[in-house]
Image: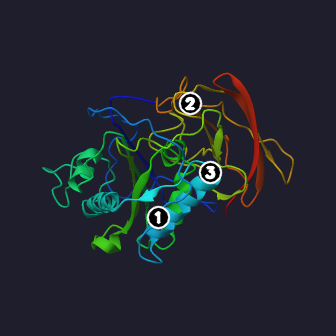
Amino acid sequence: MSTNRTAARTSAVLLAFLLAACGGGNDSGSTGPTPGPGGSSQTGISGAQGSGGGLATAAPTPNYAQGSEELAAFQFLNAERGRCGFGVLAQNTKLDAAARAHADYQLVNDLFTHTEDRAVYPSGFTGTTMVDRFAFQQYTDMGGAVDEITGETGRDDKTGFGVEGIRNLLNAPYHLQGLMSGMREAGVAVRSSRDTGTLTPRVLLQWDGAYTLQAGPQLLASNDVLTYPCEGTTGADRQLTNESPDPVPGRDLTMNPLGTSVYIATRPGNTLAVTAASMTNTRTGGRVALRAAITAANDPQRSYGANEAYVAADAPLDANTAYEVTVAGTNNGAAFTRTFRFTTGP
């Protein structure tokens, strides 16, 4: 995989569990101004990208405070990535600082956005774009790729939101894509309006990921076909009621939610085709209605590459229930079939 640009990707989801029905979900419930533009963007920075290499199976022990939501979020995501074969991430304290500063900026100014405006909202400003904000914290080797993901809930108690926020982001297709990407290091912040002394009850989870020009991305083997969820995943979020960018333009997900999404990935540069997918409730034996697989060819947000896809249940799944998934297709023309079970959460 080679390119002469840095991929800078941003995505955002509103998580408002106080407003969600039992079973959770990603409900829109921001109490601040309308979020800025979500979605994916790419920003060019000159320099040849490293070729990358094998997946990391171990990472240095993170130094987040014991019992902190940051530690819980970081360890939970690494456990999910490692178990499903996507490689683990190393903590980077500069990315931690960037994540914390941008989370606080949004809280202090009552915003939900991936951009900062020094003229209109100067308080806490550290950079207009994520690339600027990373550089402000002295993370300057961005010849590889950078990514920024934000989740929010409309309460002021952040207890448990480290895992809760990551778990829900892992059921939002464009966030799931980013959280399982080839980044090598990451920083995370879980910040509350209590932390910043602001009045609007909010908690923000900010995740910043990157890999450097020298290191290159974590790359799957050429014949790998991985999924998330994967065999043995538990507590998967059973519904999706909001994401920006919108996975189904024109459909009001707050009124007509999707169910659990399954991400399928191969090595960047490969071509993935999904020819069949099924999901079965193992308790009842009933087949789950799935939406057509989303690939690079039909992705409404043009975010998915030729090497990846996702399929989503067309309605919320049952709580605390095991489901069996079978996905079949081709990876660079070679046929594959993957069958696994996961369990939804409450």
Secondary-structure class at tag 3: loop
Could you say which disc has been placed on residue 60 in the image?
1
The foreground one among 195 and 227 is: 227
The residue mark sitting in front, 3 or 1, is: 1
Secondary-structure class at tag 2: loop
Q: Which residue is farthest bottom?
A: 66
Nearer the N terminus, badge 3 or badge 2? 3
- x 48%, y 55%: residue: 89
The residue mark sitting in front, 3 or 2, is: 2
Are the residues at dot 3 and dot 2 in contact (C-beta closer than 8 Å)? no
Give amino acid for label 1: Pro
Q: Give percent across and percent down for residue 295.
A: 57, 29
Q: Which residue is mark 3?
A: 239
Q: CA distance from mark 3 to mark 2?
A: 25 Å
Nearer the N terminus, badge 3 or badge 1? 1
Give amino acid for label 3: Gln
| Residue 306 figure quarter | top right
Q: Give percent across and percent down for residue 230.
A: 68, 49
Q: Which residue is mark 2?
A: 307
Q: Which residue is farthest left?
A: 119
Could you say which disc has been placed on residue 199 in the image?
none
The foreground one among 310 and 289 is: 310
The residue mark sitting in front, 1 or 2, is: 1
- x 23%, y 55%: residue: 138
- For the C terminus, give its image quadrant: bottom right
- x 45%, y 42%: residue: 217
Q: Give percent across and percent down for residue 94.
A: 30, 59
Q: How would you rate the neighbour count of disc 2 (Cα within 10 Å): few for under 14, some for 14-19, many for 20 or more? A: many
Q: Is residue 194 visible?
A: yes
Nearer the N terminus, badge 1 or badge 2? 1
